Image: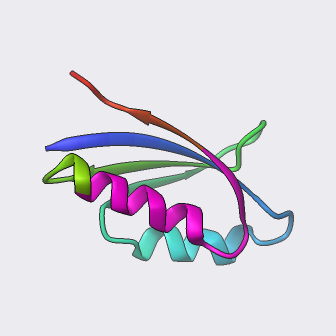
Amino acid sequence: MDKAFVMVNIEVGTEAEVAGQLKKMKGATEVCFLYGNYDFLVRVEANSIEDVKNCVANIRRLENVKSTLTMTVVK
């Protein structure tokens, strides 16, 4: 199983909407709300690195997402 952690920065006031979208996303196994530079930490798990990449790309395409930082687990 391939994994990544994605830190997500969103538009102010869209927390509930984005959280709902993230929780429904295939591959997003955990969604945590944060205080700090990023608003969410999303744990992504999939059967291949290609599927992880697709999930991250889908997160980045969400309407109110301003930026992301992805950390791919290598071991």
Q: Position of residue 52 (x, y in %)?
A: 30, 53
Q: Residue furthest right?
A: 12
Residue in the picture at 36% in, 40% down? 4
**Which image quadrant: the N terminus?**
top left
Task: Check residue 1 for magenta coloring.
Answer: no
Res 72 → quadrant? top left
The colour mode here is: rainbow
Q: Is residue 44 left or right of residue 39?
A: left
Please name whichever residue, 19 or 1, is drawn nearer the observer in this view of the structure.
1
Residue located 67% across and 44% down the image: 34
Instruction: Choose between 65 and 22: the one closer to the eye.
Output: 65
Nearest the viewer among 59 and 33 is: 59
Q: Residue at x 35, y 51 (%)?
A: 44
Question: What residue sits 86% from the left and 63% below the top?
Answer: 12
Q: Position of residue 19 (x, y in %)?
A: 59, 68
Picture coordinates of residue 37, whole percent (x, y): 77, 37
Quarter of the image with the C terminus in it: top left
Magenta span main SS: helix
- Please state the horizontal and vertical placement of residue 63, each as a whole percent of the image: 68, 76
Residue farthest top in this picture: 75
Say left or right for 12 vs 28. right
- Which residues are drawn in magenta? 51-68
Tell me: 16 left or right of 2.
right
How many marks do you count on the picture? 0
